[in-house]
Image (tube, rainbow, N blue to C red):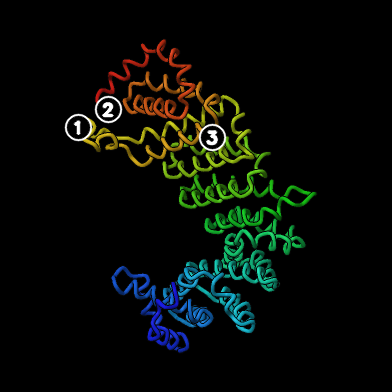
Amino acid sequence: MMESEFPQELQTQAYGILSSNDVEPLETLFSHVFGSQEPQRSQAYTFLHCCKKHFPHLLFIKLFFVIRCSPVSDTRSRSALVLRYLKICDLWPNLSLIAQNYMKSHFLVCLLEEVSMPTLRLLCGIVSEMGSEISKAGHEWPELMDFLLNSIQSDYEKLQQCALWVLAYLPKGFRPVVCEALVPSLEPLHSAILQALSSPNADIQVTACGAVVSLIGLFTSSKGRNWFNDLLRAMMVGLFNLLSHLKEEYARGAVNELIMLVMDEPQILKPYLNHLVLDMLNVLECKKVTDETKLFVDKFLLAMAEATDLAPMMRELPHETMFRLLTTSMQLLLSIKDDNAWYNTESEQGENDGKMDVYKSGILFLRKLSTALGEKRILPICFELFLGHMEATEWKKRYAGISLLAVIAEECSDEMLNDIVCISKRQRKITPGLRMLGLRL
């Protein structure tokens, strides 16, 4: 916002609230910021931006004061949320050196004293961002490294979780700095994270996956032992354990960390690609796993197929593996119901009625996968699946077959022209299926 947008009266009010020891005005502000009532909500955001523009140092100190002193966990949590919303990178450089040193020591104490895990999680993210800003300024924070090493090796689960959160939330630009600082402690750190990956505490287990992603440069840069090999295997074993104990929300979190790994450092997964694909196919083929979790697994597989470093290997997967991959994808197309609107050919909405979100996600996945793997690689398998589904007695499978044909025609149109003769020769298998689907087409 421009300076002229904030009246002098508002600036004076902001300074008075920020320089006071009274936290009640901020508590009222938080209720408006996190509420839905207008115009109070908009006015509260305007007030925050005014504070950030004219008194960023006071704003940071005031929010931290609330975090340290408020006896109400919800108030502390909201203060931390506002601090992250306003961006540490915009506020931290405005603090004096004395204030920065004070924050560096007292924020770590705050991590030790905070009893609310949701609030602690937010504070860990703030500490990670603070470390990044300190590093950008050419300074060091050795106390943070000592805190992380001591906490992650602690027998106290809260401290383990705290250290893992800080590591998992490290900004990308700060990760190499942390990795370099932790080189002397590589072995104990590796052991601690390996143990965390097999923890019965699902929160610790998933956060440990995030820590591995953040520290991947540390675990793959050593010329000696392959530290990452043990960690990746532990991540996959942990994923299957979470699924077997029906903790699918946590399992999706673990898969999401693997997706981040593919996006950040795909080349390190080359030696493990075949095993990773087979492991993920086992998840997709498990009937107990929900469609929501399977969509996360599909995103992981698609990320590998689209990654420049991994795409050639994905295209060279064995025929059996590729067939399983496309077969599991077809299962998503069965998430469809017989809707009466389909039979109303004049309805503009009729085409989409009955098609659930999982079905639509399945179509999108097949489109992207066919593009990533190449039409020459998948076309023969797709036709094989298409013909098999058209012979099915269940209408949903036949409809899935037609949907697959539509994807092939759209994404592989050149190949379709060459293979149209092959389809016509099989027309005896296709035509009955089309006729039985009737108006659904």
| Label 3 Cα neighbours within 10 Å, binned few <14 / some 14-19 / many ≥20 | many
Q: Nearer the viewer, residue 274 or 239?
A: 274
Residue at position x 39%, y 74% in the image: 46
Q: In this view, does 285 lie to the left or right of 164?
A: left
Check contact, mark 2 vs mark 1: CB within 8 A.
Answer: no
Q: Mark 3 points at which residue?
A: 372
Q: Nearer the viewer, residue 12 or 60?
A: 12
Residue at position x 55%, y 31% in the image: 373
Element at label 3: helix
Query: Percent x, y for residue 242?
Result: 51, 48
Is 149 located above or below residue 230 in the figure?
Answer: below
Q: Which amino acid does label 2 sit on?
A: Arg
| Label 1 Cα neighbours within 10 Å, binned few <14 / some 14-19 / many ≥20 | few
Q: Mark 1 points at which residue?
A: 346
Q: Which of 39 and 232 is in front in this view?
A: 39
Task: Quarter of the image for the C terminus: give it.
Answer: top left
Task: Quarter of the image for the N terminus: give it.
Answer: bottom left
The numbered mark at residue 22 is: none
Upstream in the sequence, badge 3 or badge 1? 1
| Label 2 Cα neighbours within 10 Å, binned few <14 / some 14-19 / many ≥20 | some
Q: Which of 22 and 291 is in front in this view?
A: 22
Q: Choose top left, top right, bottom left or bottom right for residue 32.
A: bottom left
Q: In this view, does 220 lie to the left or right of 349?
A: right
